[in-house]
Amino acid sequence: MKKFVLLAALIASGAKAQTAYQDGDKHEDADIPDHVMDHEKLFTMGKLDQLEVREEDSDALKGDLWFGGNRDKLWLKGELERENGETENAELQALYSRAVAPFWDLQMGLRHDFRLEDGPSKNWAAIGFQGLAPYFFEVDATLFVGEGGDSAMRLEAEYELLFTQRLILSPEIELDFYGQNDPATNTGSGLSDMEAGLRLRYEITRQFAPYIGVHYEKKFGEAAGFARAKGESVSDTTWVLGLRTWF
């Protein structure tokens, strides 16, 4: 209950701040060009796609922060999952991002896994593409090479279905593939695990959008076997309540 109250307070404070911005700072938009490729200025943008509480006393945080110009950027991506008050998994990527085509960026850099419970921390080299595919699917595909020759690949896709200009349904899916079995991290070769979500948000403003939804996770193959051996479930479905915001 305390988490829901805290989340409601965050939403209210965000809406208040945005109202103040609309009332007093609209004139600043006059200096911003219509298209990001038409200027040489440097910008910073932070976005929290998921700031949410889930059933069974768990929480999740997922977001990006980037700084740069129209073609070159420093891009940070982070994810964190907590359960029963303890951080289970956390990940941070630091990437150089280069626009190589309209709506597409080539990204390369490093990923660090903070394995706080299931095993040691791990570093990966990363290279991939992020952009907007036909029919407006947001796609992020990254190949990772880890210590000792380990390999992994992640595919993410998200779509936005507008019921109205403010009410938006957003399905998304994430698939993780690994080149080897690793019981320490509960990952298996081939398709190891999948996460899928369906979130319905209402944009109080463009920057502040509370949402409700459902989140589904499933392990496959050897990864499922590792989970069963530890007495863990191989799939889980939870209701979520959260906030999506950017600045």
Image (cartoon, rainbow, N blue to C red):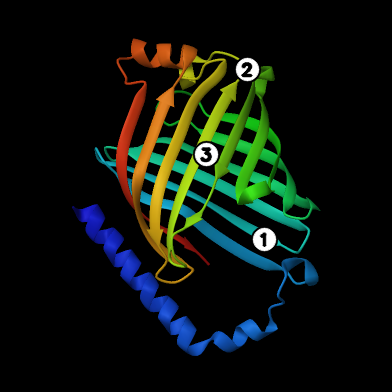
Which comes sooner in the sequence, label 1 or label 3? 1
Quick check: 185 above or below 108? above
Kindly indicate whether the residue at mark 3 contacts the one at mark 1 (C-beta within 8 angstroms).
no
Which mark is first along the chain, 1 or 2? 1
Q: Position of residue 18 (x, y in %)?
A: 44, 77
Q: Is residue 133 visible?
A: no
Residue drawn at x 75%, y 64% is 69
* Numbered circle sitting on residue 179: 2
Label 2 vs 3, first from the N-terminus: 3
Amino acid type at circle 2 is Gly
Horizontal relation, residue 111 to residue 10: left or right = right
Query: In percent of the image, x 33 and y 65: which residue is there?
Result: 10
Q: In the drawing, what numbered circle is on residue 43?
A: none
Q: Are marks 2 and 3 in contact (CB under 8 Å)?
A: no
Report the Cα–Cα distance between label 2 and label 3: 19 Å
Q: Which residue is mark 3?
A: 91
Tell us which disc is closer to us: 2 or 1.
Answer: 2
Judged from the image, the secondary structure of the residue bearing numbered disc 2 is: loop
In the drawing, what numbered circle is on residue 67? 1
